[in-house]
Amino acid sequence: VKLVESGGGLVQAGSSLRLSCAASGSTGSTSAMGWYRQAAGKQRELVAAIILRGGITNYGGPVKGRFTISRDNADTRVYLQMNNLKPEDTAVYYCYADSYYTAEPTWGQGTQVTVTS
């Protein structure tokens, strides 16, 4: 599976952004997709995840109530709607995909989100 993210950018606090992650290749083996982020000097942290069969979602604490993850009907694209962005949301956002058949997830190249105060 190959993942390509888009939608990052530079915005002011309180703004919204929508990230998109397009999966291609053997997408039929994908069990879940989601987003992690990594700010400068910090560890990578979970932002949001969605199980493709059933649509169950999970969010990291700092983004609950502000971010929403969704998928398209073909389960080849996931979106991250980010509302009420804060400067502490500034990070590189990475899309990932879990497979039923491999232990390690596939990662996208990352997209930068910068929120100014």
Image (tube, grey):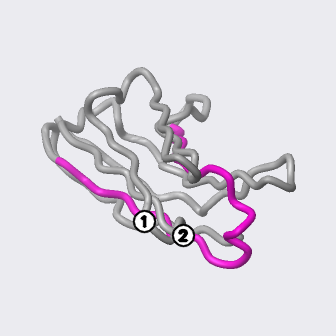
What amino acid is at disc 1? Asp
| Image vertical order of residue 72 relative to residue 61, above or below | below
Instruction: Give the residue at mark 2.
Output: 76
Separation of disc 2 and disc 1 at Cα? 7 Å
Tags 2 and 1 touching, CB below 8 Å: yes
Q: How many marks?
A: 2
Considering the numbered disc 2 on the image, is that residue within a helix, a strand or a loop? loop
**Residue placed most toward the observer, 6 or 114:** 6
Which circle marks residue 98 in the picture?
none
Quadrant of the rendered image containing residue 36: top right
- The quadrant in which the C terminus is found is top left
Q: Residue at x 44, y 58 (%)?
A: 71
Furthest toward the right, the residue is: 102
Q: Residue at x 69, y 59 (%)?
A: 30
Q: Which residues are magenta?
A: 16-38
**Residue placed most toward the observer, 99 or 66:** 99
Q: Position of residue 89 (x, y in %)?
A: 35, 35
Q: Position of residue 49 (x, y in %)?
A: 52, 41
Q: Position of residue 69 (x, y in %)?
A: 39, 47
Which circle marks residue 72 in the picture?
1
Considering the numbered disc 1 on the image, is that residue within a helix, a strand or a loop? loop
**Residue placed most toward the observer, 2 or 10:** 2
Quadrant of the rendered image containing residue 14: top left
Magenta residue check for 58: no
Relative side of 106 to 84, left or right: right
